[in-house]
C-alpha cells in the first residue's frame, strides 16, 4: 500500500473510475454549479485520483462549454471527457472543449431500447445503428479515445445490442458503456447480461467494458459491483451518489467496498482514499445537496454508535462494530486551530493542506475574511476556513451586495427587516418588509428591491463546527420562472448567513440569465435612487 492509501495491484485487476459528478450529477434539480465551482470540484476529483472526469455536455450552453475547456486546460492527471449526442455538431463542440486536455475522451451516446427508438428518436433501429457508426467514425478523426453508450441498454433487445456494439467497435470505439438509464436492472440479471456481452461480441476483448447505473430501485452500487464481477472494468459513478431522479451509483461506496472486501473482490482502484471525505463535503456544500446522516461511508453517523452494547464493543476493539476506519477516507479533521493572532503564512499553510492553492490576490481576499471572522470567533477550524473559500468561489462578480441589514422580531412583535443592497454600478437601494419571521421578512425586502417574485423551495442551516460561536452555513433552493438554483452563505449570525445565501442564489440566477431578468420595476427604482 502506498502512503496515500491506495492498493497497488498485488496481482488484482484494476477498475477504472469514471466520475460523472460534473455532468450527470449536476443534472440533480437545483444543483447547478458556477463556472468557478465546477473547476474547483474538478481539481478535487484530480486530487482524489479518479481515472476519468466527465466534465460536462458542451453543446448544452456556451457557459458549459467554457467550463469544460477550463477543466481540460487546468486539471492534470485524469482523462477529461465530454458528452455528445451522435451528431457531428455535438461532437465538434465536445472536441473543441476538451482538445487541450492531456488525455481527452469523446463520449458519444444514442438510444438503443425500443421505447427510446420509437418514442424519442422516432426512427428505425437500422437507421439509428448507422447513425451510431457514423458518429463514432466522425469522432475518430479527432481522437482514438472514444466511448460509446447505447442509452437505456438494460431495456434494449440484446440481439440488437450485439449487432450495434460490434459495429461501433469496428468503427473505432475503445470503451463500451452499458447504461442502466432508468435504474431498471437487478444484480443477478445485470451481471449475466454483462457476461454475455463480454463473451459474445467480437472485438470486446480489445475494449474496456463500462457500466453506468442509476439508483431508481436502490441497486446502483450493487449492480455496479455485480458488473465488475462479470467483466466490467470501468464504473461510471458520482460523488455522494447524486444525479437525476434517485441518483447514480456512489463512487465512494464502490471504491471502499472493493477495498474493504478484497477477500471477495480481487480488484483495485488507483484512488487516493484519504481525499474521499473532503471530496464528499466539497460536492455537498457546492451543490447544496446534503449528505444523509446515515449515508454509507461518508454520512455523519457512519462511524457513530448510540447502542450501549456497540459503544462497549468499540471501546474494547473498534473492529467489533466498525469495518471501516474513518482515517481511511480522511474523515479525521486536522487538529490545528487558527486564531486572530495567526498570520498569512499560517492561513496559507492550512489552505494548502485543505487542497486550496491561491494566488496572492485571492489569498488577500480570504485573509481579510479570515480576520473578520477571527474577531467574532475565538478559534478558526479548518472547516471554517474551507467555508470561507467556498463562499469566495460562489460569490464572483455579484450584481447585488449586502450593505445593511436590520431585523426586528419577538413573541409579541411583527417580524420586520430593513435591507440595503449595493448594485454593481454603486447605486444603493433600500426596502423594508414584514414576514412570518425575520428571515422571511428579509427575503421579502430583497424581492421588493429586485421586483423578482422568487420562490423559496428549500431552506437548510448547519453549524460548520461546534460551539455557540460556530459559523452557520445556510443553503437555499430558489425558483424563478423556469430556473431553480442553489444559494449558500456563511456567518456567525444566522440571519446574515440566510441573507447571504439568498443573495448568492439571486446573483447566480442573474449571471445565468443575464440582465433580462431585471424587471422594469427594479429598473425604475434604480433610476429614482
Image: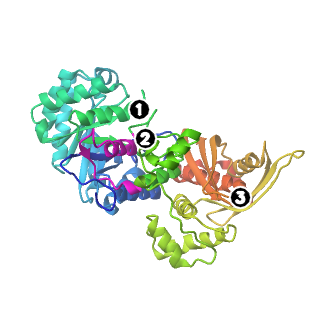
- The circle on residue 347 is none
Separation of residues labelled 1 and 2 (CA atoms): 8 Å
Q: Label 1, label 3: how many angstroms apart (C-alpha)?
A: 39 Å
* Colour convention: rainbow
Depth order, front residue of 192/113: 192
Whether residues under marks 1 and 2 lie with C-beta atoms below 8 angstroms apart, the answer is: yes
Camera-near label (3 vs 2) is 3
Asked if 468 appears above or below 304 in the picture, the reply is below
Which quadrant holds the C terminus? bottom right
Of pointers 1 and 2, the one earlier in the residue sequence: 1
Q: Residue furthest front?
A: 316
Q: Give left or right: position of 62 versus 98.
A: right
The x and y percentages for residue 150 are 25, 32
Q: Residue placed at 16% from the left, 32% from the top?
A: 198
User: Which residue is disc 1 drawn over?
Assistant: 215
Residue in the picture at 36% in, 52% down: 65
Q: Label 1: state its secondary structure.
A: loop
Count neighbours of disc 3 (C-alpha within 10 A) and say few if under 14, some if 14 to 19, many if 20 or more: few
Percent across and percent down for residue 304 are 54, 45
Q: Which of the 4 quarters of the picture holds residue 262?
A: top left
Residue carrying label 3: 468
Is 20 rendered above or below residue 359?
above
Write the residue at 58% across / 48% down. 517
Measured in 3D between alpha carbons, the distance from the residue under mark 3 to the one under mark 2, in whole angstroms, is: 33 Å
Q: Nearer the viewer, residue 511 or 33?
A: 33
Circle 2 sits on which residue? 241
Secondary structure, mark 3, is: loop
Q: Which residues are magenta?
A: 250-275
Amino acid at each position: 500500500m502506498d502512503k496515500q492509501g491506495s492498493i497497488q495491484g498485488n496481482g488484482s485487476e484494476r477498475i477504472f473510475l469514471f466520475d460523472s459528478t460534473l455532468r450527470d450529477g449536476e443534472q440533480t434539480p437545483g444543483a447547478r454549479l458556477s463556472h468557478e465551482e465546477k473547476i474547483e470540484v474538478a481539481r478535487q476529483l484530480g486530487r482524489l485520483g479518479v481515472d476519468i472526469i466527465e466534465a460536462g455536455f458542451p453543446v448544452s450552453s456556451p457557459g458549459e462549454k467554457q467550463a469544460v475547456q477550463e477543466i481540460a486546460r487546468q486539471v492534470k492527471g485524469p482523462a477529461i471527457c465530454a458528452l455528445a449526442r451522435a451528431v457531428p455538431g455535438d461532437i465538434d463542440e465536445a472536441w473543441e472543449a476538451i482538445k487541450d486536455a492531456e488525455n481527452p475522451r469523446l463520449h458519444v451516446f444514442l438510444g438503443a431500447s425500443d421505447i427510446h427508438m420509437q418514442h424519442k428518436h422516432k426512427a428505425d433501429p437500422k437507421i439509428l445503428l448507422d447513425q451510431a457508426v457514423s458518429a463514432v467514425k466522425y469522432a475518430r478523426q479527432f481522437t482514438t479515445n472514444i466511448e460509446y453508450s447505447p442509452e437505456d441498454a438494460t431495456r434494449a433487445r440484446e440481439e440488437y445490442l450485439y449487432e450495434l456494439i460490434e459495429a461501433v467497435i469496428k468503427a473505432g470505439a475503445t470503451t463500451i458503456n452499458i447504461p442502466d438509464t432508468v435504474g431498471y436492472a437487478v444484480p443477478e440479471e445485470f451481471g449475466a447480461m454483462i457476461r454475455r456481452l463480454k463473451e459474445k461480441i467480437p472485438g470486446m476483448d480489445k475494449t474496456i467494458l463500462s457500466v453506468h447505473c442509476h439508483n431508481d430501485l436502490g441497486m446502483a452500487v450493487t449492480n455496479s459491483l455485480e458488473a465488475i464481477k462479470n467483466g466490467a472494468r470501468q464504473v461510471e459513478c458520482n460523488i455522494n451518489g447524486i444525479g437525476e431522479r434517485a441518483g447514480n451509483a456512489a463512487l465512494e461506496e464502490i471504491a471502499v467496498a472493493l477495498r474493504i472486501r478484497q477477500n471477495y473482490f480481487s480488484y483495485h482502484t488507483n484512488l487516493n482514499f484519504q481525499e474521499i471525505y473532503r471530496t464528499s463535503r466539497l460536492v455537498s456544500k457546492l451543490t447544496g445537496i446534503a449528505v444523509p446522516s446515515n449515508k454509507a461511508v461518508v454520512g455523519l453517523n457512519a462511524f457513530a454508535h448510540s447502542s450501549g452494547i456497540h459503544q462497549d464493543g468499540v471501546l474494547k476493539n473498534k473492529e467489533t462494530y466498525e469495518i471501516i476506519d474513518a482515517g481511511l477516507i480522511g474523515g479525521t479533521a486536522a487538529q490545528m486551530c487558527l486564531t486572530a493572532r495567526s498570520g498569512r503564512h499560517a492561513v496559507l499553510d492550512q489552505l494548502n493542506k485543505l487542497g486550496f492553492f491561491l494566488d496572492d490576490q485571492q489569498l488577500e481576499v480570504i485573509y481579510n475574511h479570515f480576520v473578520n471572522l477571527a474577531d467574532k470567533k475565538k478559534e478558526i477550524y479548518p472547516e471554517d476556513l474551507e467555508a470561507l473559500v467556498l463562499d469566495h468561489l460562489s460569490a464572483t462578480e455579484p450584481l447585488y451586495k449586502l450593505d445593511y441589514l436590520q431585523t426586528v422580531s419577538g413573541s409579541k412583535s411583527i417580524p420586520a427587516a430593513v435591507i440595503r443592497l449595493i448594485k454593481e454600478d454603486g447605486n444603493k437601494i433600500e426596502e423594508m418588509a414584514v414576514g412570518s419571521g425575520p428571515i422571511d421578512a428579509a427575503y421579502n425586502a430583497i424581492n421588493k428591491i429586485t421586483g423578482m417574485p422568487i420562490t423559496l423551495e428549500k431552506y437548510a442551516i448547519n453549524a460548520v463546527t461546534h460551539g455557540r460561536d460556530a459559523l452557520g452555513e445556510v443553503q437555499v433552493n430558489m425558483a424563478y420562472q423556469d430556473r431553480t438554483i442553489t444559494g449558500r452563505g456563511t456567518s456567525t449570525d444566522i440571519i446574515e448567513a440566510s441573507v447571504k445565501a439568498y443573495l448568492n442564489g439571486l446573483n447566480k440566477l442573474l449571471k445565468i440569465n443575464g440582465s433580462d431578468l431585471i424587471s422594469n420595476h427594479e429598473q425604475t427604482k434604480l433610476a429614482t435612487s
